[in-house]
Amino acid sequence: MLILLVILAILVIPLTAAAFMDKQFTIEEKILIHKPRNEVFAYLKLLRNAEHYNKWVMTDPNLQKEFSGTDGSAGFIYRWKSEMKQVGQGEQEIKQIMEGERIDYEIRFIKPFSGIAVSSLLTQTAGSGQTEVTWTFSGSRNYVMCLFHLLFNLSRALGKDLQTSLQNLKKQIEKS
């Protein structure tokens, strides 16, 4: 009987905790790049450059990509489709650009789950010839996603992926 109660408690605690989690989440990571802000921003502004630094884009070498609009301007859409579950299918749209400062995106996931997230890349001068890049990723989550975030520590995993992408970005920009 005691074993049954312990098992029940192990199951009930995360299920209950997920019900009370904040439905909104935001993940933010930063990196310092040893290049001037205008150079960093010019690279970031082109969404196609993501294939050289974005961990998620780089995961599937057979990723199917489709582009519409003018890269580096609001309204540009990058669509992807992959047979790999961790990459899935979706699209990312440049929603707004504040020249030299900020790029805002809307990311629409189709597979393996549907959902919408927003993401931003911000640049700030951090000293002579240095730029701090801040990458934020936020969205809302239903009960099931709250449970996944809790059980698999998805916020930490997503933050780690953002940091890997930022490290890749740093290498790409600083090598030129």
Image: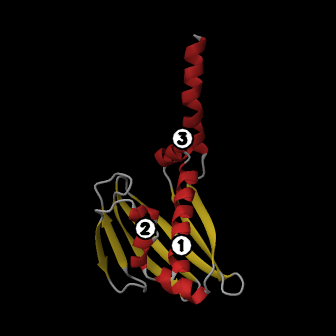
Secondary structure at numbered mark 1 = helix
| In this picture, residue 41 sits left or right of residue 55 | right
* Discs 1, 2 touching: Cβ within 8 Å: no
Q: Quadrant of the N terminus?
A: top right
Secondary structure at numbered mark 2 = strand
Q: CA distance from mark 3 to mark 1?
A: 33 Å
Report the residue marked by disc 3.
151
Look at 57% across and 36% down and name the residue there: 14
Secondary structure at numbered mark 3 = helix
Look at 32% across and 66% down and name the residue there: 80
Look at 55% across and 87% down and name the residue there: 39
N-terminal of the pair, mark 2 or mark 3, is 2
Q: Report the colour scheme.
A: secondary structure
| In this picture, residue 77 sits left or right of residue 18 | left
N-terminal of the pair, mark 3 or mark 1, is 3
Classed neighbour count for the residue bearing mark 1: other residues with Cα under 10 Å, few (<14), some (14–19), many (≥20): some
- Looking at the image, is 65 positioned above or below residue 74? above
- Looking at the image, is 91 positioned above or below residue 160? below
Where is residue 136 drawn, in percent x and y?
57, 68
N-terminal of the pair, mark 1 or mark 2, is 2
Where is residue 127 drawn, in percent x and y?
72, 84
Report the residue marked by disc 2.
107
Where is residue 33 drawn, in percent x and y?
61, 77
Q: Which mark is residue 171?
A: 1
Residue type marked 3:
Leu
Q: Point out the residue furthest to the top here.
A: 1
Classed neighbour count for the residue bearing mark 3: other residues with Cα under 10 Å, few (<14), some (14–19), many (≥20): few
The residue lying toward the viewer, choosing from 18 and 149, is 149
Classed neighbour count for the residue bearing mark 2: other residues with Cα under 10 Å, few (<14), some (14–19), many (≥20): many
Q: CA distance from mark 2 to mark 3?
A: 24 Å
